Amino acid sequence: MTNFLPKSIRTLIEEFSRLPGVGPKSAQRLAMHLLRSPRDKIESLGQAVTGLKDDIVFCETCWNIAEKNPCYVCDNPSRDKSLICVVEEILDAVAIEKMGEFSGVYHVLHGRLSPVDGIGPDQLKIVELVKRIENGSKDDGEFSEGKSYKINEVILATNPSLEGEATALYIQKALIGFDVKVTRIARGLPVGGDVEYADEITLMRAMKGRGDF
Amino acid sequence: MTNFLPKSIRTLIEEFSRLPGVGPKSAQRLAMHLLRSPRDKIESLGQAVTGLKDDIVFCETCWNIAEKNPCYVCDNPSRDKSLICVVEEILDAVAIEKMGEFSGVYHVLHGRLSPVDGIGPDQLKIVELVKRIENGSKDDGEFSEGKSYKINEVILATNPSLEGEATALYIQKALIGFDVKVTRIARGLPVGGDVEYADEITLMRAMKGRGDF
């Protein structure tokens, strides 16, 4: 088997199978698919991979990745700077942005508290969040270019998992004393879900969080 | 959404989602995984993709891909050149080779007959197979370097699908008149399978192909 396929293909299969969610069989199929593709398609994928980190910076306001600092969202005058949505990962912000209903700005923590994995508050962008709100609090209410904005509300949109909840709780405590409303995204039954099949904790949350009809 | 992620990431997500079996969500995750990877890991994947077609040739005997022509298998003196296993795709040969029990050589058709997709015998390496056997038939029985070998048996290992069976049948007919035994891999219940859940055609095949106990 070792030499049955040419080395360049074996290398690619190996590289592909290192990616998350790609098993050895999928890696083989991906490699074979590329082998059948025209050379320019292969090159464009290769270049997209190699050039991934080109021109990427962190926005030093919301810590999302961006082409410039501040990022497209933080720099957008039509976004509501007084409303910050705190998320664990970049892709969480992508999902919320896709919804198209959120007009505030983001704060990406880049992870969640996880003592098991040795992830404490210092590994996340929590200090930066507190500072952001602190600077906002000092604001005299007048909006002007290059200034910090008064932050009215922080929505904690970390995952409704054990670690996500702990992270939300930690941030909530860290923000005590600031003149800012701290909220948490609702936990309940997903739309299209089924009461019968919902787990007990979700059901409990859905009951607790019930609203007027 | 359009500008929410930096261009280099959007490009990579787009490239990834063009791959078979990779949806937009997986493409996003793969891109984010790479973004968190060290630069040298990213480069090695990029180079593996770009260099995929380097040093790859077709073996003009068995039409497998190889680093040289003839390939590692066709050039191996310990392989039985009188036994040819005909497969649809390279990965089929890889699977058979992995088994480690086949000592013959291969012939890769690069597809299967499929009138719906416009794939006829001319698009496959069938003429090459017939020529290979024809040359082998002319052999005077003496084995020497650089010569064609007398081919005793052709195992048709195309898929047990409608198209694979049609392809096998076509080849079998094309080889009538040559002094060569044409066989077909057994179709029956997969080992570990269940009679109860087997489909009717598989069961029928398993009964028809029954052997002495």
Image: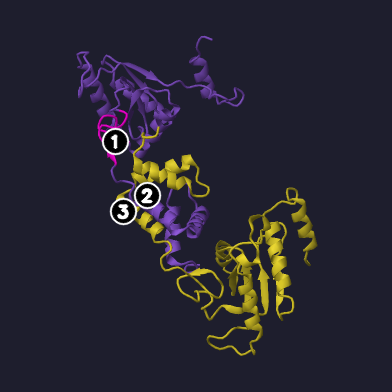
Chain colours: A yellow, B purple
Sequence-wise, which precedes: disc 1 or disc 2? 2
Q: Amino acid at mark 2?
A: Ala
Magenta-drawn segment: B56-73
Is B58 placed above or below A157 here?
Answer: above
Residue B17: percent from the left, percent from the top?
A: 45, 53
Mark 1 closeness class: few <14, some 14–19, many ≥20 residues within 10 Å: some
Res. B20 visible in picture: no
Is A43 placed above or below B208 here?
Answer: below
Q: What secondary structure is marked by label 2? A: helix
The C terminus of chain A sits in image quarter: bottom right
Q: Is residue B71 left or right of residue A209?
A: left
Which disc is residue B48 wearing? 2
Residue closest to the far top: B212
Labels 3 and 1 in the same subunit = no
Which disc is residue A40 wearing? 3
Labels 3 and 2 in the same subunit = no
Res. A9 visible in picture: yes
